[in-house]
Amino acid sequence: MEWLNYHHLLYFWTVVREGSVSRAADKLRLSQPTVSAQVRMLEDALGERLFIRKGRTQLLTDIGRTVYRYADEIFGIGRELLQTLDGRSPGRAMPLTVGVANAVPKLIVYRLLRPALAQSDRMRLICREDNAEPLIAQLATYSLDVVIASAPAPGYLPIKVFNHLLGESDTSFFAPKAMAARLRRRFPASLTQAPMLIPTTNSPLRRALDEWFDAEGVSPRIAGEFEDSALMQVFGQAGECIFPAPSAIAKDVSRFLGVGAIGRLESVRERYYAISAERRLTHAGVLAITSAARDQLFK
């Protein structure tokens, strides 16, 4: 192959970014058959398959992932060229696109991602929040560089991903300060019939808490269940309710939310993972996240 048809590459890149041929066709203002034909012509020119079908889903092949990365770089340079000619180039920054599972406390997320922004090379952080499984699915199309989650990727997902353990923390209960001071004196018996906010039943932390309640013989009054840990903490702060949070960030939780710690549950532990499409991490931002977590955050 002596040269590359960049129109074909653009159509392929748009299909991957948009997540389907139909959405790419809408974006490009072309018909779906035209977009599909252009992608097939790119495959013919490269002599490689870029997509593989699993059920109703089209996933990128290994070659497809490589081509997408180069395409993303090529069209990123094109955008920078236009900005430079327009006199408004901000200087090149490496994008780091992170999927953040709702269940992961936002203070944990901040402390995990902060080292990436401290790199000597400029980095532009893009965060997307959702439940873990939809985010993990986006790793197949390289829409995300990494997913931060509180559990490893489920084995039943139809994509191959890799779990990188960042660390773990036990759990503490918190409440508005006056309430925390009152409940702290007879903890954990004081939790019985006390209003509490907890994660929903699909959370590993919820299952661990239920086991702890049974073992300790306490039965709090469940006032609310939340998938989003940040929303749970806001309700706990404002609504005179107990809520759990990682002990690793206990000082930050108390300071930022103006709450007090009630007691610590050393047997209730939560792990945090960086989930990637590759076994060997190469993105400088992801490497900064994993090395800092192991060396600092969970020590």
Image: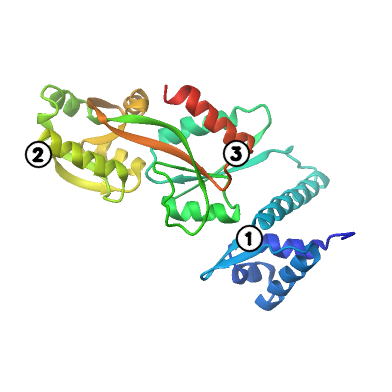
Question: Is the residue marked by circle 2 packed among few (<14), some (14-19), or many (20+) residues within 10 Å?
Answer: few
Question: Is the residue marked by circle 1 packed among few (<14), some (14-19), or many (20+) residues within 10 Å?
Answer: many
Disc 1 and disc 3 in contact, CB within 8 angstroms: no
Q: Quadrant of residue 187?
A: top left
Q: Position of residue 230 (x, y in %)?
A: 36, 41
User: Is 64 displayed left or right of 170 in the figure?
Assistant: right
User: Is 289 displayed left or right of 66 in the figure?
Assistant: left
Q: Earlier in the sequence, mark 1 or mark 2?
A: 1
Tell me the CA gap for discs 3 and 2. Answer: 47 Å
Tell me the CA gap for discs 1 and 3. Answer: 21 Å
Q: Nearer the viewer, residue 23 or 89?
A: 23
Q: Earlier in the sequence, mark 1 or mark 3?
A: 1
Q: Position of residue 284 (x, y in %)?
A: 63, 34
Residue 16 numbered mark, or none: 1
Instruction: Assign the N terminus to one quadrant of the image.
Output: bottom right
Q: Which residue is mark 2?
A: 193
Q: Tell me the SS state at disc 3.
A: loop
Query: Could you tell me which residue is drawn at 14 percent across and 35 percent down?
Result: 215
Q: Position of residue 61 (x, y in %)?
A: 64, 59
Q: Earlier in the sequence, mark 3 or mark 2?
A: 2
Q: Tell me the SS state at disc 2.
A: loop
Question: Is the residue marked by circle 3 packed among few (<14), some (14-19), or many (20+) residues within 10 Å?
Answer: some
Query: Could you tell me which residue is drawn at 68 percent across and 30 percent down?
Result: 121
Q: Position of residue 184 (x, y in %)?
A: 16, 24
Q: Tell me the SS state at disc 1.
A: helix
Q: Nearer the viewer, residue 38 or 51?
A: 51
Instruction: Assign the C terminus to one quadrant of the image.
Output: top left
Tell me the CA gap for discs 1 and 2. Answer: 51 Å
Residue 281 numbered mark, or none: 3
Query: Could you tell me which residue is drawn at 31 percent across and 29 percent down?
Result: 170
User: Is 130 displayed left or right of 117 in the figure?
Assistant: left
